Image (tube, rainbow, N blue to C red):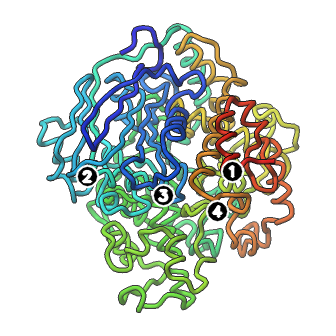
Amino acid sequence: MSEHLYAYAGKILRVNLSNGEISTEPTTKYIDDWLGSTGIAIKILYDELQPWVTPYDPMNKLIFGAGALLGTPAIGANKMSVSTLGPVTGGWASGLSDSYVGLHLKYAGYDLLVIEGKASTPVYLWIEDERIEIRDASRLWGKTTWDALDLIREELNDPDLHAVSIGPAGENLVRGACIIQDKNRAFGRCGTGAVMGSKNLKMIIAKGSHAIKVAQPERFMQAVKEYRKLYEGSNLGKYGTLHCYGRKQEISGNNWKNFQESSIPEELFEKIDPRITVKKYEIGPESFPGCGVGGCGRRLHITEGPYKGLKTTSNQWETFSTIQTRLAIEEPTFMVKANALCNQLGLDVNLVGGAIGWAMECYQRGIITEKDTGGMKLEWGDAAVALELAEKIAYRKGFGNILAEGCAKAAQIIGRDSDYYAMHIKGQDLYEVLRGSVGWCLGTATSTRGGGHTTGALITETFPNNDKEKARKVFNIDVDDPLDALSYEGKAQLVKYMEVSHRINNSLGICHYNTISVDINFINLPHIAEFYSAAIGREVSVDDFEEIAMRQLNLEKAFNLRFTDFARADDLPTPRDLAEPIPSGKLRGWRIDRAEYDRLLDEYYELHGWDKETSYPTRATLEKLGLKQVADDLEKINKLGK
C-alpha cells in the first residue's frame, strides 16, 4: 500500500497467465489524466494492444478496475469495472458490477488488475494482499457460476468468500458471455466473459486486509452526511430499476415481441407488472455498501407456479424488458427464472433476449423454419423454449450455436433479409426501446461500446417524478423542458453532459442509480467533485471532470477506429426505429424524424469537435485534450476528422 496516496490503493497488479509472471506498477503514473478504473483501463488498452490483436488472442488484456472511491463511504461507491477488446463489437468493451471483489482488490493494495496471456489449463487467480497465486481450476471448469462458488467456498472452508467467475457460456466462447460477481450480479454486455474464457481463467478471488484512506476525513464525512439528505423520501430502492415500469408504458418504452410493439398490451399490463411479483415473493432486501437508496436488490422465494422453490435475487429492468416482454411471455415469475439461469450460465441477458427475439420474429415471418432450429417451434410466449434456447446458447448446441453469436452475426449467418429484425447497435444486441425517447435514443446509439444506455443516454427521461425546473438548473440548459422525451431540443448538449457524468461515475465506482441518472434530486457532478477532492486532498472541479471524461471518450473513439470501421452510419438507430412509427399505446403514430435526428447528430458531433461527415475526431480536438500521438495514429490509418 502507498503511504502517501489517498483514495487509491497505489498499485496496478499485472498477471501473465502464459508464463506466470506477476508484477506491479504505481497507479500514480495514470491518475492525473485518466482518473480511476475505466479511464486507466482504456489508456492501457490503447497504448499496449497492437492493431493486429483480436479479442481471443492471448495478447489481449482483460482489465479489472476498482473504482477510485471504492472502499470509502462515498454514496453509491460500490462498482468494479472490467474492460477489454471485445468480441461483440470488435472494439472497446467495458462493463460494471456491484462488487465485493472490487472492494477486496483495493483492500489488498491494487487499483487495477491487468490480465494477459492464456493459461495452458483452467486456472483461477487468488489475490490475498501481497500473496498472488495462479491455481488449478480443472475441477471448476464446466460448472455453473453458482456451483463453482459453492465448491470453492467449501474447499477453502470460507462461506463468506467472494469471487468473480465465468460459467459455461464464457468457457464455450459465447460471444455475449459475461462475468458474474458471486451469484447474482453481472458485468453486463460486450462479451467480457468470453475473453476471460479464452484465457482459461475461471475465477478471481480477492481478500484484502489493508485500509483505504481519505486525505480530509472530516470534510469527506460532512459531505456524506449532507448528501444523504438528498435521498430522503425516495422509494427507488423498493423495486430497483423495475420502478420505471409505469413510466416506460407512458413513453412507449416497453419492448414487446422484439420491438414490434413499444407497449405492453393493456389486458396484460397489471398481470405481468414486475413490481407486483417482487412485492409478492420478497423475503428481504439486498444491498451493497454505500447505496443511497437502500439497495436495488431483493431476495425472492418463488412459492408457487412453474418455478416454485426458486430462491434468488430479483432481476433488474433489463431481464424483464429484453427476455420476458420481448418474447411476450405472460408468466409473471419467468423474469426471475430467466435471470437466475443466465447468471448461472454466465450469459448476458441482452444477448439471450436479442438473439431469441430475432429468431422468434424470423420464425413468425417464415424466414426461419423448424428445419433451421432442429425441430423447435419458436412461438411467442413459449417460456420453456426460451429457457431451452438459453441453455443451448451457453453450450453452443444445435441452433443455439448460431444464436450464441448474437443477433447481428446470427442474421449474417442465416441471411434471407433477416438482418432487419436483428435489433442491434454496432453489433451489440439492443434492449433499449429507442422510439419515444430522444435523449435515450441518441445516447444509446452513439455509445462507444455499442448499444447501451450507461455511457451517455439521458436515463432521467425514462424515469418518473423528475422535475423539469430542477433539471434546467442542474443541467444549466435553457430549454422549456429538458426531460421532454419527444423533444429534440437541447438533447445533444444533455447527452454530452451525461457522457461526462457516466464516465466519472464509472471511473470512480459510483452507481448510476445513486445519481441524477435516475433522479434529478440525487448527487451530481458537483457533489462527486467534493467527494473526490476531499478524498485525494487536491481540488478537482466539475470542469476538470469534463476535460478528463472527454479525453477518455475520445480515446474510446480512437480505440474503436483502430480496431473497427465504425463511422457516422453506426451512430444511427436501427432501421426499424427509423422506418416504423410507434404502432400502439399512448404515443401511437410517433416516429423518429430522420431529418431531425441527422440534425441532432450534426449538433452532437459539433459539440464534441468531431467531423460531421465521418464522426471521426479532429486533430484540433485531440491535441486540445493532450492526445497528439492519438491524432498521429489516426492520420496514419486515414481516420482523422477534417
Please name which of the two marks, 2 or 3, marks the residue nearer to the observer. Answer: 2
Q: Which residue is drawn at 27% across and 37% down?
A: 205
Specify which label sits upstream in the sequence, 3 or 1.
3
Going by the numbered disc 2, the residue's amino acid type is Trp
Q: Residue 276 carries which label?
A: 3
- Element type where label 1 sits in the image: helix
Q: Which mark is residue 443?
A: 1
Direction front: furthest residue: 636
Going by the numbered disc 4, the residue's amino acid type is Val
**Residue 274 at x, y percent in the picture:** 49, 59
Q: Which mark is residue 490?
A: none
- Element type where label 4 sits in the image: loop
Please name which of the two marks, 3 or 1, marks the residue nearer to the observer. Answer: 1
Going by the numbered disc 1, the residue's amino acid type is Gly
- Residue 464 visible (yes or no): no
> In the image, 603: left or right of 444?
right
